Image (cartoon, rainbow, N blue to C red):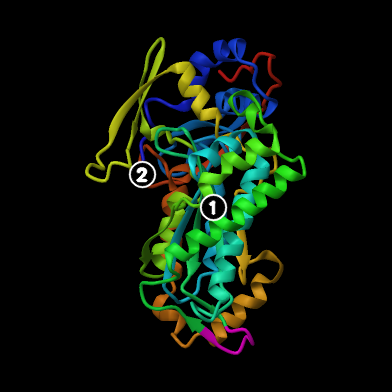
Amino acid sequence: MPRPTLEVADIFREHGAVYRETHSLPLEQLRVMRAIEVCRTAALGGHVEQCGHCDYTRIAYNSCRNRHCPKCQNSDRAKWLEARQAELLPVEYFHVVFTVPEQIAQIAFYNKEVVCNILFKATAETMLTLAADPKHLGAGIGFFAILHTWGQNLLHHPHLHCVVPGGGLSKDHERWISCRPGFFLPVRVLSRLFRSLFLEALQAAFDEGKLNFVGDLEFLQTPKAFTAHLAPLRGAEWVVYAKPPFGGPQQVLAYLGRYTHRVAISNQRLVSMNDDSVAFQWKDYRNKESQESKTMTLQASEFIRRLLLHTLPSGFQRIRHYGFLANVHRRAKLELCRRLLTVPVTELLPTPTDCQQLLQAITEHTVRCPECGVGTMVRIAVLPDYRWPALPPNTS
């Protein structure tokens, strides 16, 4: 894929200094801006590479490795995919999305860690409880959930994407119980239990003094106002929806390859930047009649503000595993699942070639010579980094 002509780093370098001077930013957001600005520049050092076939030479600067950086996700994605490859089961996979109403999203904005942890907990309990119910599946399932906090317009929109194998272990662990083809669990039942569990946990967090209310939400500091704010949500339908199921593990791997380590906006979506504005492509998914890409133009300061909305707290885990995929017993439970499944593994699991091709597609641009397209780039020299704000070393 050719390098985009405009990058988020360019916008930060052009408008970031003014934005920092005119806004009081938390340390985490300052770190994100700084990391993206210096990513793959002389500031971080790097190395010189040479093609073993045509002697083409280039300088490769180091990545910032910040999880909010659009340029630093490929290597992490490849490593994560390689680990997931060994966990795939020969069954149909489902994709379920849990989101919260706008009133909750507003509270989450000022209480990211607390509310997003509640989102994970309520989602996991909902899925595990209903799947274990004999009236539905009657099995212990396993799945992983990925947190996204943005919509296409970059506004704050926290939601979880869950990827679930279509079935689970019986209570006595003697059988694999498959769900009906093309159907996992009833969405309306999922939605209502999720709503109940989430609001219960949110109320408990308020009672324990774990929530902060500032700005437009200061009025929610009293128990009466908080209860009244949540009252309309208790009878509303919350958005939980199931996307069409994947055909099998091959499709799951391809989906994960482009989705799990996504950031709020990719460089490919940026259209233009001038002295005071930034334009980018977006889709209005609420307009079901038209899903064509549109162009949104924002003031540069507003674009930066929206982008920084999605800075996660330091150390916050945005991909989590549950049920028989939980870290504590994943290997043993997966071995049990494979023994109990009657479908031959070779029929549905991706072949080593499939996985290698996908991982190669993700990382190939870093090792293949861009000049001849045949040779492999080999490191021949190391370039030292430097400590900002000192001047970079002379690499001429």
Q: Which residues are magenta?
A: 170-176
Q: Is residue 320 visible in this depiction of the protein?
A: yes
What amino acid type should be assigned to the residue bearing mark 1? Ile
Q: Residue 240, percent across and down? A: 45, 56
Report crowding for label 2: few under 14, some 14 to 19, many 20 or more residues within 10 A (C-alpha).
few
Q: Earlier in the sequence, mark 2 or mark 1?
A: 1
Q: Nearer the viewer, residue 263 or 3?
A: 263
Q: Quadrant of residue 123?
A: bottom right
Residue 251 location in percent, x, y?
Answer: 39, 63
Q: Is residue 368 above or below residue 44?
A: below
**For mark 1, does the 10 Å Cα neighbourhood hold few (<14), some (14 to 19), or many (20 or more) residues?**
many
Give the Cα separation between the discs numbered 2 and 1: 35 Å
> Which quarter of the rendered picture does the N terminus lie within?
top left
Q: Is residue 39 above or below residue 391?
A: below
**Residue under circle 1?**
146
Label 2 is placed on what type of residue?
Gly
x 59%, y 20%: residue:
395
Disc 2 target residue:
373
Asked which secondary structure carries label 2, the reply is: loop
